[in-house]
Every structure is written in structure tokens, then in C-alpha cells.
């Protein structure tokens, strides 16, 4: 299957990366789509230009995707000012068609960041519209809509999962890959202290979800419950 992470920012994929690694191990192809350039994520480097910040985030994300043998598409919209417009929809529909998405991981409908919630709404529409032949993009429409799973938002507020995946066997690889997002590790430490970098944050979350599903580390999800996105067959590993 073609498994696609559709997120607002580079590093947002980390909340489902363990599950994606397990899906790759069973033979699935991984794809990553970011709607924004992620330039405002360089909160610890305010002297950096917007262009430099965007390029920095691009290099980090590209390195991670190359390490997992996936594909990466950045739609290049302005970070923190993402809106549901025709331009954005057409870009996302085209990107989804290019991947021939069969499974999508995306943000939860309620999250701390408006870009995240906007992406959720965009995915809800564009994953349906990618099948519409009268909406023209560079790539042809797909035959069916993908299964869609919403990932855990920051610290899990207003999120009650229904599906868990034990990622204990890939947690070390997930931590290794997260290190490609060096800028965000530095941002975490600048905001929360030297002892709480990106790896500590990931392990804190995955340990809580692992306990719930009987493992050392886990990831939790909710399906997007609307017509066409819920499947009658097993999707998650």
C-alpha cells in the first residue's frame, strides 16, 4: 500500500513514524507531504531569515525521508498562515494523486496549532476530491478514497484513541531518525530545558501509549469517520 503522512510541518510526522516504519517492513511504500515550509519553527534562531529557515527545515526533512526510502513533497505554503483555499486544495489533491494514497496519517481535528487543524480539514476534503475526474491536476484521479487516521495532538488534549500500534521493536530506529530534525531538538531544549529534547518528548508520549496497549512504546490513532475513509479490512500493522 501507499502510506502517506500529510502534515503541516516538518517533524509532525514523528507521531506516526513508528507505525510507518512497521508498515514499510511489511512492504508498503512511504510518502511524506508537508503543506508549509516550516520556517517559523526556528524559534531559537530569530536572526535567521525566512528563506534560510525554510531551507534548513527542507534539508532536515529530506534527509529523514531519504533514510527511510520514501518520497517527499513540500507544497511550500507560508508557515502559521495556512488556509483552506482553492490553490491549497488543488496542490494537495495533486500531491495525493501523485502518491496514489491508500492510507493517510494526518493531524487530529482538535490541536493546539491552527495549521494542524486546517490540514485536517483539507485532508477530509481533498482525499475525497482526489477521486473526482472533473477536478483537473497534473496527475489523474484515483479510483477510491484512502483510509485516514488522525494522529495524537500535542500532549493528547481532547484525543481519545481507538487504535493502538505497538512500536517497541522500532523505537530505537524512530529515535535515530528524529535526530535529523536537529533544529527542532534545539527548539525543544530552548523551550523546555536541556533534558527535554525531541527524543525525550517522543519517548514520553510513546511510553504512555505503549502502557495502554501492553507494550513498552506505542502510537495511538483515531480513524476519520466519514464516508469512504473507514475500511472493512485491516490497515494498521
Image (cartoon, rainbow, N blue to C red):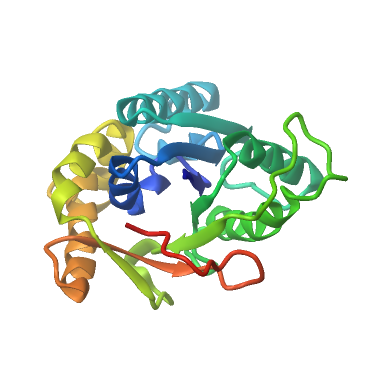
From the viewer's perspective, tell me whether residue 133 is left or right of residue 72: right
Which residue occupies 28% across, 31% down?
A: 180
Q: Position of residue 25 (x, y in %)?
A: 28, 41
- The residue lying at 72 percent from left, 32 percent from top is 139
Q: Which quadrant of the structure image shows residue 141?
A: top right
Q: Is residue 85 in sight in this rendering?
A: yes
Give the camera-side residue of 15 and 189.
Answer: 15
Q: How many marks?
A: 0
Q: Which residue occupies 42% across, 24% down?
A: 56
Q: Is residue 164 left or right of 73 when viewed as pictured?
A: left
Residue 62, given in percent of the width and then of the height, sits at 41, 25
Front in this rendered view, residue 9 or 69 = 69
Residue situated in front as seen by the camera: 1 or 136: 1
Looking at the image, residue 7 sits to the left or right of residue 137; the answer is: left
The percent coordinates of residue 185 (x first, y second) are 26, 40
Q: Position of residue 214 (x, y in %)?
A: 15, 72
Asked if residue 57 lies left or right of residue 121, the reply is left
Tell which residue pokes out farthest to the front in this image.
233
As drawn, the residue found furthest toward the right would be: 134
Placement of the C terminus among the 4 image quadrants: bottom left
Asked whether residue 197 is in view, the answer is no
Q: Is residue 131 above or below residue 166?
A: above
Residue 148, compared with residue 213, is above or below; it is: above
Q: Residue at x 57, y 36 (%)?
A: 99
Amino acid at each position: 500500500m501507499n502510506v502517506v503522512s500529510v502534515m503541516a510541518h516538518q517533524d509532525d510526522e514523528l507521531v506516526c513514524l513508528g507505525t510507518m516504519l512497521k508498515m514499510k517492513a511489511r512492504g508498503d511504500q512511504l510518502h511524506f507531504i508537508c503543506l508549509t515550509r516550516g520556517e517559523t519553527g526556528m524559534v531559537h534562531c530569530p536572526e535567521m531569515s525566512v528563506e534560510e529557515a525554510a531551507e534548513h527545515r527542507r534539508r532536515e526533512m529530506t534527509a529523514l525521508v531519504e533514510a527511510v526510502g520514501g518520497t517527499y513533497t513540500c507544497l511550500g505554503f507560508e508557515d502559521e498562515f495556512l488556509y483552506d483555499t482553492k490553490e491549497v486544495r488543488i496542490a494537495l489533491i495533486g500531491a495525493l494523486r501523485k502518491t496514489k494514497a491508500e492510507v493517510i496519517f494526518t493531524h487530529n481535528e482538535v490541536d493546539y496549532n491552527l495549521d494542524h487543524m486546517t490540514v485536517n480539514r483539507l485532508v477530509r476534503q481533498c482525499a475525497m476530491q482526489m477521486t473526482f475526474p472533473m477536478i483537473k491536476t497534473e496527475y489523474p484521479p484515483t479510483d477510491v478514497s484512502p483510509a485516514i487516521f488522525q494522529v495524537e495532538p500535542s500532549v493528547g488534549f481532547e484525543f481519545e484513541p481507538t487504535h493502538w500500534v505497538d512500536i517497541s521493536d522500532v523505537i530505537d530506529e524512530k529515535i535515530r531518525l528524529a535526530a535529523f530534525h536537529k533544529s527542532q531538538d534545539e527548539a525543544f531544549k530552548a523551550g523546555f530545558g536541556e533534558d527535554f529534547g525531541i527524543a525525550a518528548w517522543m519517548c514520553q508520549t510513546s511510553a504512555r501509549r505503549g502502557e495502554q496497549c501492553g507494550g513498552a512504546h506505542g502510537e495511538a490513532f483515531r480513524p476519520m469517520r466519514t464516508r469512504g475513509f473507514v475500511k472493512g479490512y485491516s490497515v494498521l500493522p
